[in-house]
Amino acid sequence: MKFIYTMILYLSLCWGFTWQFSGRTHPELNWTTMETEHFRVHFHQGIEDIAKEGASISEQVRPTLLQQMGLDDIPIIDIIFTTEDEIMNGFAMHTYTTFIWVDQNEAAVWLEDEKWLYQVVAHELQHIVFSHKINTWLPEPWESLYSDTPGWVWEGLAEYETERWRPHRADISHKYHVLKNNMDKMDAHHDGYSKLLYWSDRFGDSTIVSTFTDRNKLGLFNFEKAFKKHTGVEVKQFNEDWRRHMNTYYYGYRSQKEPLDEIGEVVSLPIKKLDSFAFSSDSSKIALLGKDDKNQWDRSLIIAVRDTAKERERLEKQLKEDEKTKFDFFTKLIGDEEKEEKKKKNSRYYGIKKRLTMDIFITPVNI
């Protein structure tokens, strides 16, 4: 009886993933199901053509995804397409089900010359194929707990098998985290991709499939033991080797670039996470696109108005403070000139950054 209650609770959490993600429900949508040879495609009104295209893509990529994992067949897969809440995402479940948000313009820059529908369908279906590959007789969620497969394996494998390395997947993220020395905080979608590339380059493609095919005497799959068996390296040591490899590459790459202050001035704008910005023709307003809160999921367009009076007031205050920090003739004569010169340079740099950051006073405009 406890088992039944546990499964009901677990499945009920899965059923509500789409509305839990956005905190909204959509009773106004009317759903339709379209069946193909290997898929059941569910969609609502307004996206009939997208659903047909998605079904076609699914049938086309299915043989390749199965071949990559050394599989001959897989049960019927349910695909749910929706445009609700304009979320650029998708997720797959071990129940051979995937939810995909479609018709997303936001993916244009992120994907470069690729199409969102093809990319997200192939990615999510690979998750399901991989889940089927490591599936055993042990029911969920205990199978996942026993296999202990890291998130970077799930995401990295999907990207390795269906995508190509590019700035937003995930070269930019690697540059940032390497130089910040916090690679342990990278998203699984980012470090997972490079770890799979490193795994393949170091041990060969064949070890990837053989690792996921491995089963112990009980017929169960455990990632750490299977990885050690087929690569000869502990997962912990592999992660450390990967970290050193990435640091060597990106620090070597960075050493060939000019310092930022040789390119231009480093400035900041009054927003938490900035995607892009543009000044009006008279410079009196600035449009900011990004996130104004670290917990914000969607992006906002903010029209900010410059308050020149407050800018002038802050600038005068800054100049007075700078005047107080000037050293007279005797201080320069007696003091450590090199040390004071370095201090003055740092003071000027942070002063510029602080001034540009704080002097752009904004008045949000409803749009």
Image (cartoon, helix red, strand yellow):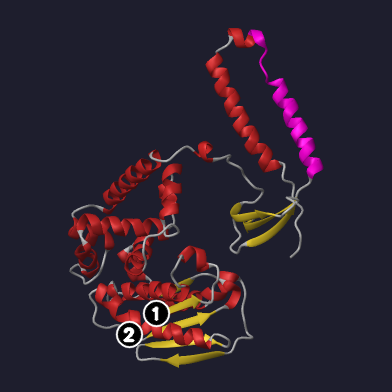
Q: Is residue 140 above or below residue 256?
A: below
Which label sits on residue 75? 2
How far apart are the alpha carbons under marks 1 and 2? 10 Å
User: Mark 2 packing: few (<14 Cα in 10 Å), some, or many (20+)?
Assistant: few
Q: Is residue 14 left or right of residue 220?
A: right
The magenta span reads 308-330
Res 293 visible: no
In the rendered structure, does residue 249 fall within the stretch colored magenta? Answer: no
Residue 209 at what x, y percent from top left?
23, 68
Q: Residue at x 60, y 56 (%)?
A: 276
Q: Residue at x 44, y 82 (%)?
A: 54
Which label sits on residue 95? 1
Mark 2: amino acid: Pro
In the rendered structure, does residue 317 fall within the stretch colored magenta? Answer: yes
In terms of secondary structure, where does tag 2 sit? loop
In terms of secondary structure, where does tag 1 sit? loop
Of the image marks 1 and 2, the number of the one nearer the N terminus: 2
